[in-house]
Image: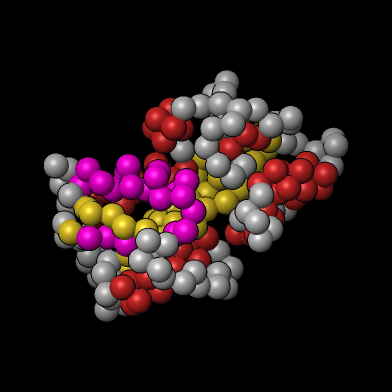
Amino acid sequence: MARRHLAAGRLVLATHNPGKVVELAELFGPHGLDVVSAGDLGLDEPEETGLTFAANAELKALAAALASGLPALADDSGLCVDALGGAPGIYSARWAGPTKDFSIAMQQLRSEMPATAPATAHFICALSIAWPDGHVETVEGRVDGRIVWPPRGSNGFGYDPIFLMDGKTQTYGEMTRAEKEADNHRARAFDLLRDLLPDPR
């Protein structure tokens, strides 16, 4: 079945995470898309019951598209640590608790990692675009790296201060937003979605 292309116009970003809203808006804005967040529209956050990043991205995108009557984009992303069997994975945000305090999540990750275990880890990002008629397009991007401790840098959000991407000398938390967004898991997923978007302005 042919992939569906997104027309210029309004696009709902199905997230209530301010950091993701900024990053996604900067990626999609130049393509003639007027982006608005689910939070700005007062849409509820659906329960993430999927067992994969792709499944959760799709259910969030579909929920926002059906509720708004507009195409919607959802991101589901997380940190997968090899020594923890891929955890926190799809539960990355939930490790931060109801207050979304990622210092708690990073400390939990550190305490659960065996002292002699490899520090290898990767970030995954699934991006889904859903239309109000139920059609969905999904892609997935990945970057590999390792966990560092103590946390380094205060930029970004989530687990950025403890993730050092392969080939880099700075954690995501030490990079500027432009440096991080030039080549991270979300940018790699976006590249796979690019041919479905309107041409850049």
Color theme of the render? secondary structure
Q: Nearer the viewer, residue 85 or 159?
A: 159
Where residue 40 sits, quadrant-wise, is bottom left
Task: Give, as a single range, the part of the protein colored magenta.
Answer: 10-31
The verdict on residue 16 being magenta is: yes
- Residue 2, x across and y down, in percent: 22, 66
Relative to 6, 44 lies left or right: right
Residue sitting farthest toward the right: 115
Residue 137 visible to the viewer? no
At 33% across and 77% down in the image, what residue appears? 66
Residue 70 visible to the viewer? yes
At 23% across and 54% down in the image, what residue appears? 34
- Residue 139, x across and y down, in percent: 39, 56
Relative to 105, 93 lies left or right: left
Q: Nearer the viewer, residue 97 or 93?
A: 97
Question: Which quarter of the figure is the C terminus placed in?
Answer: top left
At 27% across and 78% down in the image, what residue appears? 133
At 49% across and 69% down in the image, what residue appears? 45
Main SS of the magenta segment? Answer: helix
Where residue 127 sits, quadrant-wise, is bottom left
- Residue 142, x across and y down, in percent: 49, 45
Where residue 182 sits, quadrant-wise, is top left
Does 99 sit above or below residue 161?
A: below
Question: Which quarter of the figure is the N terminus placed in?
Answer: bottom left
The verdict on residue 83 being magenta is: no
